[in-house]
Amino acid sequence: MEGLKKDVIRHVVSSLGSDYASKSAYNYYNALALAVRDRLIDNWIKTQRSYYDEKAKRVYYLSLEYLPGKSLMNNLHCLGIYETARKAMSDLGFSLEDLAEQEWDAGLGNGGLGRLASCFLDSMATLGIPGYGYGIRYDYGIFHQVIEDGKQVEQADNWMRVGNPWAYERGQHLFPVRFFGEVKNWTDEYGRLRHTWTAGDTVLAMPCDMLVPGWDNHHVINMRLWSARSDVEFDLDFFNTGNYLGAVEEKIFDEKISKVLYPSDQIEEGRELRLKQQYFFVTATIQDILRRFRKKHQDMTELPQSVAIQLNDTHPAIAIAELMRILLDEDLLDWEVAWDICVSTFAYTNHTILPEALETWPVSLLERMLPRHMQIIYEINARFLREVERVARSEDCGQLCHRDLDHLKQRVSLIQERPIKSVRMAHLAIIGSHSVNGVAALHTELLKARVFDDFQRLYPQKINNKTNGVTPRRWLWSANQPLSRLIASHIGTGFVRNLDELTQLEPLAADPAFREAWRAAKLENKQRLQAYIKRKLMRELHTEHLFDVHIKRIHEYKRQVLNLLHVVTAYNRLRHGQAADFTPRTVFFGGKAAPSYFMAKRIIHAINAVAATVNADSRVNDKLQVVYLPNYCVSQAERVIPATELSEQISTAGMEASGTGNMKFALNGALTIGTWDGATIEMAQAIGPELLFIFGMREDELVSLRQHGYNPMLYYHGDEELREALDMLRSDAFSPGQHGLFAPLVDNLLHGGDRFFVLADYRQYLGAQQDVGRLYLDQEEWTRRSILNAARMGFFSSDRAISQYAREIWDVAPMAGLQNGKGA
Ligand code: NTF
């Protein structure tokens, strides 16, 4: 402890240039972070060296998004120095918890996809897999959400304003990134046509490394994030012509590339700068990967034995064309050889089946910005369509019918003709990869049967499932110390590394003393949340209420509106005195809406309006409260999830690819009210469906309802409570003086087709909520189920997910000496 204290003081003085006697929390947080980083860097260097020494096959995880959140507590726990640090900082006059609050969340992602990437890096580090995360170091992450007059207002997330003590910026290792320009043809010595791309503009990519430690194993992997740097400083001509300001302007223009994360989620924005970001990221990453590979290899055909590249959704899919370009134009390989290398190296994960989220880029844009890549994509397509024809005409084509060949070719082509001629990035990713995986069993089945059915017939081996998981280090151990300590006191700490060990809790569910201790841990977390809400929102929570929580991005398919209709109905019953047996509850909502998503923003407004009405109504507010948690983010999730008793996972069946919040809640002992969707299905199967509150129509039932003509008006007319709730929303009951404010929401349900079947599931949802309320009155039974939920969550560790990727897709093994935890 004395060593750590000394290091902290030294950093306050020599790294931060401050007087150690001036007790600034900001300085001491930074100094502690630097002292922790010192303890990581040696192991990071050793880890990187060992990859070379052992000629390990490396895994590169390419993701435009990460959501690491805060690093301090997680890193202290991984290093096993949390207690030491707590004591050291307390000696120096600080509470570790307060210092940790000084850190800004690294919010370099939108939601589930980015958080999954961060959980995966944590698992690679812990399992000892030679992995690297690659991404973009956005200057501005996901926007900061404030609620003003009930509405979302976006503010810039200037997360690096106060510096980032965790990152190593490597200004000396810059990679050139080229755009625009033209392609020249030439003939090589064997008479083959060759191509050279001479680019117009160049910018530079600077690596910023953030260290990702494994759990108690000395294995530290790298998350390398690229930041755009202009090359005009090196362009002497510019200065010589006296155009100083012109040069500076160009510099600012170039550096715009990594300025801001696109805040869309499940909606593709299709803007030129976004494509620039994607290519900027991809080319820098591929250059770095090949630089490392070429240190030990000359023969490019050995690449797939040494390198696995996982594409996190289609955002980095242009990497396939980029690797082809390098192999063809720089290494001068033949097409077939280059293509084999690509397909064997790449694998692609799909995270959504919503059509509006499937990426396409206009051919005209690609032709201008990346002319050589567009040529390559055309060539990939031409060869692929010839192959399709061959397979379709062959004897063994199974269900493929060559009379439909033209249609088939149009459907699978990389190029879509309408509404504008564009490249379908998902098709490029599928064709250019040896593995395509979905993220939960149902999602993968839907990929095979619906979205990519043609590809499933063409390549029946390619599409596979890897159900998501979450890291128990952050989402149980670090976020929920009261519960973790209780668990550890009965079964030891092995579950942090091997989550299956939680099954040892099962017999304890029958032990009243253990149940009492389990409830005490939950209460402690509820009180902690209460204190936080008091500080932040100046609201007093009732900790004896059932804490019912719905936090995730705001999207129609996630059906926050269904939850809201339950709240309004409960409000009406209480007002009308029809709810004598109502179980008191506080309903929490939290989540960001994409700034351009009108309906999602209106939903936020409606939730806040209902909250204001309910909370102000003294007839009901001792029994029902509604809280909107502004600026939902990773660190807020870490506070809220441990305090949650009821987890809302109520998406339209078939629409949520997996969900990962669902897993975090159950792991922390919340019971789930949910639909038969995403990974919630597999959770119900692992836990026992009777221990969750499952309701609603299933995916196949919705398909047939849609086919037979779904009429939401029937539900409106047939259900008095539903009608009352919708009429209130449409009138000014929750928006005094602003008649019609929420009419778009209601009209969308009644006259817009209710695409997400809110009304169809309303009555069943109410029934399930009634069951929840009733069960909560029986605290012994509730607690028993809560324990069994957590005990059966072992499968949903990201360690299990990453082990499957490693074995079944990447063909990589953990580093020797690390499999069993302790590193060398
Ligand atoms: C999300 N997809 C899905 O909507 C979630 O169900 C899933 O849990 C996560 O991915 C992680 O797999 C996206 O965010 C995106 F961008 F693909 F639409």
Image (cartoon, rainbow, N blue to C red):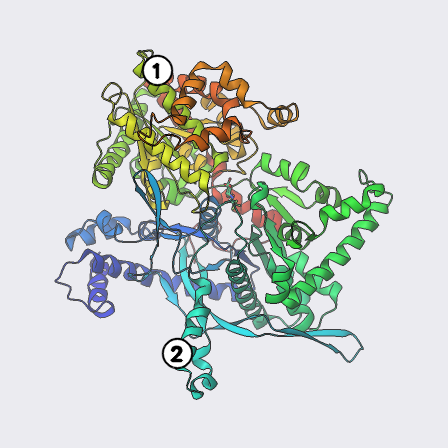
Residue type at numbered disc 1: Arg
Above or below, 625 against 47 in this view is: above
Q: Quadrant of the C terminus?
A: bottom left
Dot 1 surroundings within 10 Å: few (below 14), some, or many (20 or more)?
some
Report the side of 619 relative to 65 (left or right).
Answer: left
- The mark closer to the camera, 2 or 1, is 2
What's the amino acid at mark 2?
Answer: Leu
Question: From the Cβ of disc 1, is ligand 1 less than 8 Å away?
Answer: no
Residue 27 shows in this picture: yes
Q: Position of residue 373 (x, y in %)?
A: 65, 65
Residue 438, position in %: x, y?
59, 42
Label 1, on which residue? 573
Residue 139, horizontal then vertical, whole percent: 39, 61
Q: Cα distance, mark 2 to mark 1?
A: 67 Å
Image check: 25 left or right of 132? left
Q: Nearer the viewer, residue 518 or 464?
A: 464
Q: Is residue 649 visible?
A: no
Q: Residue at x 23, y 63 (%)?
A: 7
Q: Is residue 747 above or below residue 317?
A: above
Q: Quadrant of residue 654?
A: top right
215 lies above or below 443: below
Residue drawn at point x = 70 percent, y = 40 percent: 453
Q: Residue furthest left?
A: 21
The dot on residue 178 is none
N-terminal label among 2 and 1: 2
Seen in the image, is 407 located left or right of residue 278?
A: right
* Residue 411 image point, x, y percent: 72, 46
Which residue is denoted by mark 2 in the rendering?
245
Query: Which is more toward the observer, 468 or 295?
Result: 468
Tag 2 and tag 1, C-beta contact below 8 Å: no
